[in-house]
Amino acid sequence: MKKQTIYTLLVIVFGLSFFVTPLGDYSKLQLNRLFASQPTVISPESSARIQDYNWKLKDADWNYFNFKKSEGKVVFINFWASWHLPSRAQLKDIEKLYERYKGEIDFYLITDEEKEPVEAFMAKNKYNFPVTYQIIGEASPIKLLKPSGCYLIDKNGLIRIHQNKISDWDNKTVHDLIQALIVE
C-alpha cells in the first residue's frame, strides 16, 4: 500500500471513531466544552420578572415540593438530560458552580427523565448537585427550556440570565454577577 492510502485510511478510521466509539463521545463532549460561550447577562431594566413561584417539582428522593421555597433567593435553574450531549458538556462547570455557591443560592437542575437512569448517570460522573424532577403537565412560572437551557434569577424574581445553549458557567462574569446578586 502506498503511504497516501494508509494516511487516508487512518483519517477515515479516526472520523468514524467519532460516531461509533466511546472515544468519539468523549471527543464530542470536549469539543462542546471548548466552544461553549459565556452566558449573556440581562440588565435589571431589560429583565422579565417571575410573577408566581407556585411550581410543584420532585426532589432526588422523589418527594414533592414547591418552588415557592426559593422566593426571595438567588436561583440557578438548568434543564438537562443525561442522554443530551450539550447538557452533559456543561454539567462539569455547573458542578463547580454548585460546589462554590451551595448554601448561598438555590440550585434546580431539572430533568424529566426517570429516577434510575439519572441516579446511574450521577454516580458514574460523581456529581453532587441536587437533582430536581419535572412533573410533566405541571404549570410553571417560567418558560420550560429544552435541555441545556438555564436561568439565573435574582432575589426580586428578575431573570438575569436566560440561556438556551451550552454555556461556560465557570468564568469571572458569572462569578461576579452571582456575588453581586448574593449581597444585593
Image (spheres, rainbow, N blue to C red):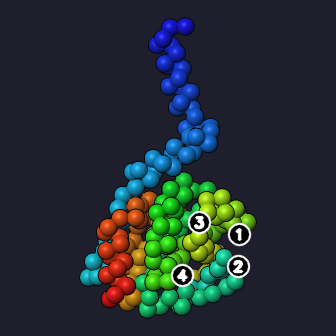
Q: Position of residue 47 (x, y in %)?
A: 32, 80
Residue designated by label 1:
115
Q: Earlier in the sequence, mark 2 or mark 1?
A: 2
Q: Position of residue 42 (x, y in %)?
A: 31, 74
Residue in the picture at 70% in, 79% down: 61
Residue type marked 1:
Lys
Identify the secondary structure beneath mark 3. Answer: loop
Q: Earlier in the sequence, mark 1 or mark 4?
A: 1
Residue type marked 4:
Ser
Marks 2/4: CA–CA distance: 18 Å
Residue designated by label 4:
140
Residue type marked 2:
Trp
Residue designated by label 3:
127
Identify the secondary structure beneath mark 4. Answer: loop
Q: Nearer the viewer, mark 1 or mark 4?
A: 1
Residue in the picture at 41% in, 80% down: 153
Residue designated by label 2:
62
Question: Can residue 137 be seen in the rendering of this structure?
Answer: no
Marks 2/3: CA–CA distance: 18 Å
Marks 2/1: CA–CA distance: 8 Å
Identify the secondary structure beneath mark 1. Answer: helix
- Give the residue furthest to the right: 116
Q: Position of residue 17 (x, y in %)?
A: 58, 34
| Horizontal arrangement in the rendering, residue 172 relative to residue 1 (left or right) | left
